């Protein structure tokens, strides 16, 4: 009986975990505040999420670029080609309509970021 209860509990936990992961969707416009070693900025990202696959656009101090990345549960990672700095990589945690994390802009250095979903 205890083994059966433990097995049912394990299945419920797995299903609950999948449900939480499926609910994380960052599709939309996000306003970022980025603090780099070389200065700060307020870029805008527009994300489209399809399952764990993330695509979209960047508009900011390093021009305009297409982004690609992934969303797994409440974690996000994406990259884009930053004019004059090479590839920029962002990693962070999603918290509803907010996110925060770290970024690496190659030659322009690293830093931190936070974001809120527009509208």
Image: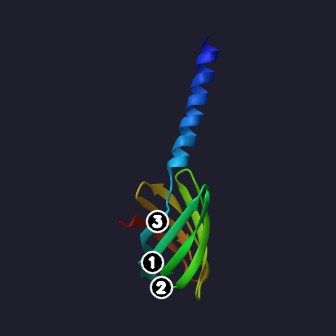
Where residue 5 sits: x, y (%)? 58, 18
Where residue 74 sits: x, y (%)? 52, 52
Residue 73 seen in render: yes
* Residue for badge 1: 43
* Residue for badge 2: 61
Say few, some or many: other residues with alpha carbon within 10 Å of mark 1 (under 14 / 14 to 19 / 20 or more). Answer: some
Tag 2 or tag 3, which sits nearer the N-term? 3
In the current view of this chain or complex, which residue is farthest to the left?
119
Q: Please tell me the numbered disc located at residue 27.
A: none
In this rendering, the answer to whether 8 lies above or below 25 is: above
In this rendering, the answer to whether 39 lies above or below 78 is: below
Say few, some or many: other residues with alpha carbon within 10 Å of mark 3 (under 14 / 14 to 19 / 20 or more). Answer: some
Q: Quadrant of the C terminus?
A: bottom left
Tag 2 or tag 1, which sits nearer the N-term? 1
Q: Nearer the viewer, residue 15 or 102?
A: 15
Q: Quadrant of the N terminus?
A: top right
Q: Which element is circle 3 on?
A: strand
The residues tagged by marks 1 and 3 sit, at their Cα atoms, a distance apart of 14 Å
- In the figure, residue 88 lies in which quadrant? bottom right
Where residue 22 sits: x, y (%)? 55, 47
Residue 88 seen in render: no
* Residue for badge 3: 28
CB-based contact (under 8 Å), mark 1 and mark 2: yes
């Amino acid at each position: 009986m205890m083994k059966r209860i433990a097995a049912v509990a394990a299945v419920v936990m797995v299903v609950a975990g999948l449900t939480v992961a499926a609910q994380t969707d960052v599709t939309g416009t996000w306003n970022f505040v980025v603090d780099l070693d070389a200065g700060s900025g307020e870029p805008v990202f527009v994300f489209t999420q399809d399952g764990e696959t993330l695509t979209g656009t960047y508009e900011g101090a390093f021009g305009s670029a297409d982004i690609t990345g992934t969303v797994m549960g409440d974690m996000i990672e994406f990259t884009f080609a930053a004019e004059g700095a090479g590839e920029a990589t962002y990693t962070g945690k999603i918290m509803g309509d907010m996110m925060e994390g770290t970024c690496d802009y190659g030659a322009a250095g690293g830093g931190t970021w936070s974001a809120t979903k527009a509208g």
